[in-house]
Image: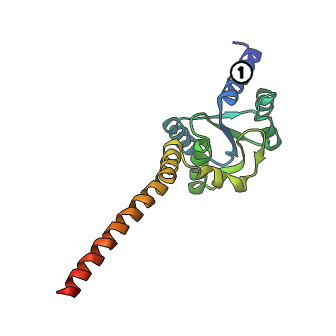
Amino acid sequence: MPNYDLKTKKIEELNEKANDALSIVVGEYRGLTVDEMCELRKQSRESGVFLKVYKNTLAKKALENTKFECINEVLSGPTIIGCATDEPGAAAKLLFDFAKKNDALKLKGVSLGDTLLGPEHIKTVATLPNREQALSMLLGTLQAPVTKLAQTLTQTYSKFAYALVALKDKSN
């Protein structure tokens, strides 16, 4: 396969992933050992995050006319790109957790769409609840008023019963 066809295939691959992605995280992997990169790739497969090293010029061409075009601002140096397709915070969580253990991985930015957020916002995105957690939080919020009402009604009858028992005890 000629070099041009290979580059075109890589551009199309990242463009397709970017169009399906909910968020993209960019990091600089300079200084990571081969074993550390293999471990990072293994973790990305387990968490369902698309993770790949791209040349910056190819990545810029691939991200043109996508909602993640703003990522082009931080594409410099040896770049690794993580795309989260299932959960918005999955790629950020993966790279953030890995960067805590490996100082060589420097996170450059995260995008949840048209806006590029700096490395200081990656922790916030990484701590976003996943779908199940968000649904359980919503259910708890919706259920709280009904539960409180039931407790209030039960307490009213209980207090009335206690008052009757106290009145009976007082009269005896």
Report the residue marked by disc 1: 12
Q: Position of residue 87 (x, y in %)?
A: 57, 39
**Does residue 164 lie above or below 135 as drawn?**
below
Res 106 visible: yes
Residue type beneath disc 1: Glu
Q: Residue placed at 65% from the left, 28% from the top?
A: 20
Query: Mark 1 falls on what kind of element?
Result: helix
| Image side of residue 73 versus residue 16, left or right | right
- The quarter of the picture where residue 64 lies is top right
Number of numbered discs overlaid on the protein picture: 1
The local crowd at label 1, few if under 14, some if 14 to 19, many if 20 or more residues have their Cα within 10 Å, is some
Q: Residue placed at 62% from the left, 41% from the top?
A: 88
Q: Residue placed at 44% from the left, 59% from the top?
A: 149
Image quadrant containing the N terminus: top right
| Image side of residue 163 versus residue 83, left or right | left
Looking at this view, is 40 or 163 the one in front? 163
Looking at this view, is 4 or 58 the one in front? 58
Name, please, the residue furthest toward the front. Answer: 171
Name, please, the residue furthest toward the top. Answer: 1
